[in-house]
Image (spheres, rainbow, N blue to C red):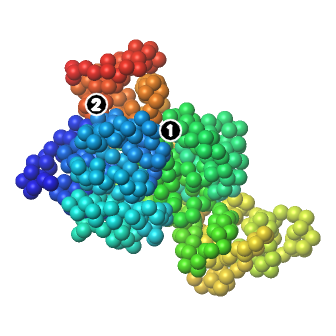
Amino acid sequence: MVNKDGFNICGKALEEKLEQKWGFSAFRPLQREAIEAALSGRDALVVLPTGGGKSLCYQLPAVCGIGLVVVISPLIALMDDQVTAARQIGLKAGALHSQTNEKSRKATFAELYNDKLELLYISPERLVGGGLLDLIRRNIGMFAVDEAHCVSHWGHEFRPEYRQLGGIFSDFPDTPRLALTATATPVVQKDICAQLGLRDPISLIGHPDRPNLVYRAFPRHDQTRQVIDVIKRHPGEGGIVYSQTRREVDRLALGLAKAGVSCAPYHAGLSANDRARAQDDFVHERLDVIVATIAFGMGIDRSNVRYVVHANTPKSIEHYQQESGRAGRDGDPAECVLFFSVSDLITHRALSLRDDGISPERRRALERNLNEIARYAISPVCRHRLLAEHFGKPYPPSDFPVQSTSEGCGACDVCLGETQALPDAEALLTSQKIISAVFRTESRFGATYVVKVLLGREDERILANGHSSLKVFGLMKDSTDAILRSWIDQLVVQGHLMVTEGEYPLLKITQSGLNLCRGQGTVRLGLPSPRLPKSGRRQKVSASVGSKPGDTGTPLFEKLRRLRLLFARKLAIPPYMVFPDSVLTSMSLLKPTNLQTLRQIKGIGDQKRDRYGSAFLEIIAGGDPDEVAEKFGGDFVCFKSSVS
Ligand code: ADP
Ligand code: ZN
């Protein structure tokens, strides 16, 4: 263990390692604190949003000579990628889990035995399964528990095997423990500390905001069309489209494919082979879009996903944060769009109730979660703020330079003026009109019917029921079907109307809806703009993210991207592991002419400079990607050259 003095020396050395291995000049918030805790032998809980840079918190101690860092992760599918990425920057990493092949397993064991390994990624099953502890004990430096929320019943992804980790750790009393997660409410945080037996841990809780993401939430009226509109804003870029059920995933994927989108479906109903292929194609950029149920994502680590669309409403804000969080993990601008409909809430309820054993407690949690995500989706209030406040943090963060407050966050549909709040008086009057249409039709119909009445459509049923002579018939004829439906949804979410369960959901008026008609109570209504911007990106990105609006799409950027793809194919690794998008953007803006200036780009460490630098310089000097890839061949040893 490092003593106080040694620790100070190490403090300076930390920056050097960061620069040398990763090519980063500064730590992100709380990284240094987490690393220092580990190096001084102290337990820590780290809560940082996705993309916040959690892996560095346990990778850097490994290269500071702390000893073997054992990283416990439930995401087997991700582990091999993490090992590959770590090796790309020169870390000695290996993995052990149920799907490790014989050759890798033997190699990892040999490295372990010879104390050659710095990082061991391991599944909890493998660790608690026994047979390894004595080997690990020889050189253990620290334990890092990734996705630590899985240890808690209160979290959203409980894993029973995680419960046994505390017992294992108690066998290693001198080894510091680092628990990391992206989402943990205070209750979950407490549970993590208790379950993993963290001793007087330092809590490093970051701000949950993701400043590089633009959040948008709109009412859904034409799912496929709306999703395609988002995809069109990101030609050639990677995106994930989440839908609610397998059937909808298939239907949507078909619709997108017909529109010429390079995509594949992904859900639990497909064979393991088909799923693995879809995932692999997506990660290796042979495919732009994955259309998936939430079964997809746990095992995906493509860091340059530029957009995540929710074609249906997710189950909770936690789920939304997690799923949308897969966009822009590399810190570059990305977009998250949610298309909301009350009908999704009904489906979520129905799907959960199928599970007969659902306890009253879980049922209440389900309702609370649905309510919260629905409010998020329909409130004409800054989305960054709503998300931050949900996780108990103020927005804007006090130490965070956002744009002027008059513009709000500058990165959500509300602050960008795409969704506007109706003035209070107009919102009230509008709500009263809609509620009276439900009242006049005696609460015997669903939203479709009520909308038709308000628009004054002379539909057969309406005529037969004599409803075309009602005062409310055509009362809102200047509105549109989509807007009226959204307003009805908004009234449902705010509790002024309710929808009955069953095959034909009917609209009913609640007590607070009746009050509203008497002018009592408050209501907010948002009016989404019919037109959306061409680009889904945030135009200005906060300095703390350190990335510029992409120079993507320029001929030079595309050539660099092509070379990255060719190299990645030769090496059979995902392109983002060669370089993240931001490095290509910087190259195309700065146009370095030698290895020394190229090395100054954020994200290029020594090993990557040596491996890829010369080849990319040739592209910047006007070379052709296919010829350069051919010239440098598959043998990356020939990339080795000293700094010119
Ligand atoms: P998380 O696990 O928290 O989601 P990662 O560890 O995958 O985040 O890091 C997200 C991205 O941020 C990666 O591309 C990583 O290289 C980058 N990153 C991490 N730390 C820094 C830093 N100090 N400076 C710049 N980029 C960083
Ligand atoms: Zn905003």
Closer-to-camera residue (231/536): 231
Give the Cα distance between marks 2 and 1: 23 Å
- Residue drawn at (38%, 60%), measured in percent from left and top? 148
- Mark 2 is surrounded, within 10 Å at the Cα level, by few (under 14), some (14 to 19) or many (20 or more) other residues, namely some
Whole-percent x and y of residue 29?
28, 54
Q: Write down the residue under mark 2.
A: 607
Taking the image as shown, residue 11 lies to the left or right of residue 326, namely: left
Badge 1 marks a residue whose secondary structure is helix
- Which residue is the site of mark 1? 283
Foreground pick, 98 / 538 = 98
**Is residue 383 shown to the viewer in this render?**
no
Quarter of the image where the C terminus is located: top left
Among the two numbered marks 2 and 1 on one chain, the one whose residue lies closer to the N terminus? 1
Q: Amino acid at mark 1?
A: Val
Query: Residue at horizontal 33%, vertical 46%?
Result: 120
Few, some or many residues within 10 Å of mark 1 (<14, 14–19, 20+): many
Residue 632: x and y in percent read 38, 17
The image quarter in which residue 370 lies: bottom right
Q: Amino acid type of disc 2?
A: Gln
Counting from the top left corner in percent of width and height, residue 47 is at: 34, 60
Q: Is 58 above or below relative to 283? A: below
Up-down relation of residue 98 to residue 483 (above or below): above
Classify residue 258 by image quadrant. Answer: top right
